[in-house]
Amino acid sequence: MNGVVCAPCSPSLNNRRRNSPPSIAAASIGEDDMNTGMPSSPKKPKPKPKPSFLTWTAEDVVNVARFHWVPCIFAVGLLVFMGVEYTILMVPSTSPPLDLGFIATRSLHRLLSSSPTLNTFLAFLNTVFVGMQAVYILWAWLIEGRPRATIAALFMFTCRGILGSSTQLPLPHGFLGSGVDFPVGNVSFFLFFSGHVAGSLIASLDMRRMQRLEMAWSFDLLNVLQGVRLLGTRGHYTIDLAVGVGAGILFDFLAGKYEETKRKPSILAAAATTTIATKETLFT
């Protein structure tokens, strides 16, 4: 009546719409329906992911042994020591601890037992080495302005005090003390873990960061000699020295992370100050 002519609908399209249930018809209309007038194909469900090991091939297994041989060695070590742990006899409570480091240094222990002067001289050299560690760590902070080694040493000695107080191990049988050893005067000390070894390693790691490689290698060599002497005098168990190495690495890493957390806010503050200064320059 108003001059608008309605185009007749296709009979087939009307029949399709009449015959389709409302829910199915509504679900079948998508972008394809709007663009082409044809119903879109239903979406296929995503296949469930398979467990990773089901996708491995023989080549993958060979490549694991080829490119990841270090974890493979650790896996073999796990199996070996699982067998050792379940077959080895426990040390009786009435016997001293079995320490392989003590067995390896029996001849040195006999030598130092028969020569107190030599034992005192080596103890004096060890105390000098401990002083060298302390001087370097404090120098890096107070003179060079790099506190990481100092923070690591503070972390390490605090943790050592907590662990040493929690489990106070008995003095090893055959301990050879000296009045010039560190701690000076044969005072009581914590066995677990070795602060001598950990402190030396903290200093050595800092030297490597500063490319003082000759000093670092010298400290590592002195640290090894120090460990041999500590075993020979029965001043530490082998496990104390091994954990001391790990503690030095760990607390140096934690000190680095601590510095990063303190450095980020200062970087953000500097960036914000630069942005404000730039805006003031543009709008003045």
Image: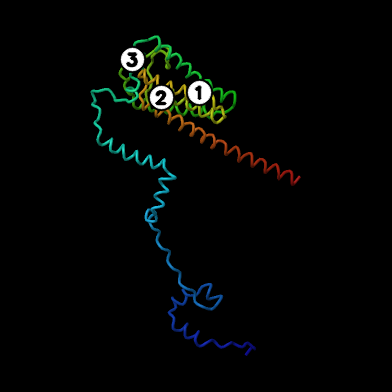
Q: What element does badge 2 sit on?
A: loop
Q: How far is the residue under mark 2 from the one under mark 3?
A: 23 Å
In the displayed structure, would residue 52 be above or below residue 276? below
Q: How far is the residue under mark 1 from the one under mark 2?
A: 19 Å
In the displayed structure, would residue 183 be above or below residue 160? above
In the displayed structure, would residue 24 be above or below residue 8? above
In x, y percent, where is residue 34? 55, 75
Are the residues flagged by discs 1 and 2 in contact, CB closer than 8 Å? no
Q: What is the crowding at mark 2: few (fewer than 14 residues within 10 Å), some, or many (at least 20)?
A: many
Three-letter code, disc 1: Ser
Q: Which residue is mark 1?
A: 218
Q: Which residue is mark 2?
A: 194
- Per the rendering, the mark at residue 110 is 3
In the displayed structure, would residue 16 be above or below residue 223? below
Closer to the N terminus: mark 2 or mark 3? 3
Three-letter code, disc 2: Ser
Q: Which residue is rendered at x = 68% and y = 43% of the image? A: 276
Choose top left, top right, bottom left or bottom right for residue 212: top right
Three-letter code, disc 3: Arg
Q: How far is the residue under mark 1 from the one under mark 3?
A: 28 Å
275 vs 144, nearest the viewer: 144
